[in-house]
Amino acid sequence: MSDAVRALRDAAPSALAVLVRRYGDFEACEDAMQEALIAASAQWPRDGVPDSPRAWLVRVAARRYVDQVRSDVARRRRESIAAELEPSPAPVPAVDDTLTLFLLCCHPALGRPAQLALTLRAVGGLTTAEIARALLVPVATVAQRISRAKARIKGSGEGFRMPDPDELDGRLAALRNVLYLIFTEGHTASSGDQLARVDLSAEAIRLTRQLHAAAPDASGETTGLLALMLLTDARRAARTDATGALVPLDEQDRSRWDRTMIDEGIALVTEVLDRAPIGPHQLQAAIAAVHDEALSTEATDWIEILGLYDLLARLAPGPMVTLGRIVALAMVEGPDAGLAALDRAEAASGPEGTALAEHHRTWAVRAHLLERVGATDAASLAFVEAARRTLNGPEQRYLASKAEALRTTAG
């Protein structure tokens, strides 16, 4: 990633927050910021990144906003208003209002899908296509959700402020979901030639730290989410080799894992499990902690992981939870038990069975289990199908190489 692109991604959320605080019109400010980002993407690579990228974006976007006001149909009547909106020469405040902007995007007038889409777009920095892949919905659907969400916030008349205490819990739950989606996209990109997007995962961790420090955490789920991110991101350096090729968990050099992040994550999840009701993020963090504490795949306490997945499946059932439990079951009871459980899960009626049957990770798990029982030809075909269904380059190449290796062995 170039310095200009990195500076844009870092500065854009807080610059938009400054603009919304100044003018109050979220939809118009977001449109103006998009024009400023286009201008910056053309100018910064050529002329260099300005000393204060955020101030540059605020200044340019503010001018675009004023131009929009002046070009309204009631130009003459609103000319005096537009004159008062001229950008102030005062410096941009140092305070980071990104969290407030996140919570505005999680307005209770919006449904959960709209909250996720708008927050990912306005603050998370994901494109509409990336959001569509993250949410497993069409691009056009995401675009409509974002447009309608901005209009609803405008219509609600809500100012740019932290929510009242009685509103906070609902918005925090939505915000945690958004942060986890951003982190997930950063940990394993939904498309492209890089396995991970470190800028996204780092931003998700930064914002989760900010949320953890700024907001009450009676549920323990914000602490659990931060622990989960740290324990997962700690393995990042070992997930690829020197060429950028994917290295699966059981083949990773665990000496390359970040022990500082692991120690912090374990301390967080241990503390929260002792004081708060058990929640899904805490359970996922506990699973990650068991992995990170083990010296090898063979030394991993798979029985404990299976028990944690049993709890997680009751609290927060879903396709990926089911798939994770099947992997743990196969490690405890053998690959035949895992394959039987996978067949049952895929055959289940409803959206979960459909989502499992169509997801590339389901095909990859099936391929690994078939390889373990010696069904080489079937495993090779399953690896091919898994590779066909993912848009992530390193994942594609790894899965295709597994298929080719099995074909060579069979031949």
Image (cartoon, rainbow, N blue to C red):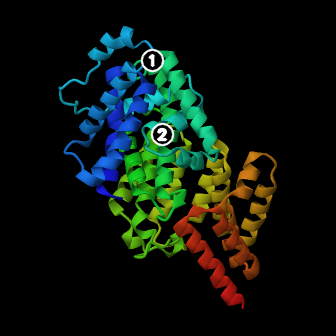
Residue 305 point in image, percent of width and height: 58, 59
The quarter holding residue 100 reads top left
Q: Earlier in the sequence, mark 1 or mark 2?
A: 2
1 or 2: mark nearer the eye: 2
Look at the image and tell me whether residue 221 can be seen. no
Q: Amino acid at mark 2?
A: Arg
Under tag 2, what secondary structure? Answer: helix
Q: Observer-nearest residue: 77 or 52?
A: 77
Q: Quadrant of the C terminus?
A: bottom right
State the CA–CA distance, disc 1 to disc 2.
19 Å
Residue 211 point in image, percent of width and height: 38, 37
Dot 2 crowding, Cα within 10 Å, few <14, some 14–19, many 20+: many
Q: Tell me how many marks there are.
A: 2
Mark number displayed over residue 158: 1
Image point 38% across, 51% down: which residue?
A: 202
Q: Amino acid at mark 1?
A: Glu
Residue linked to disc 2: 121
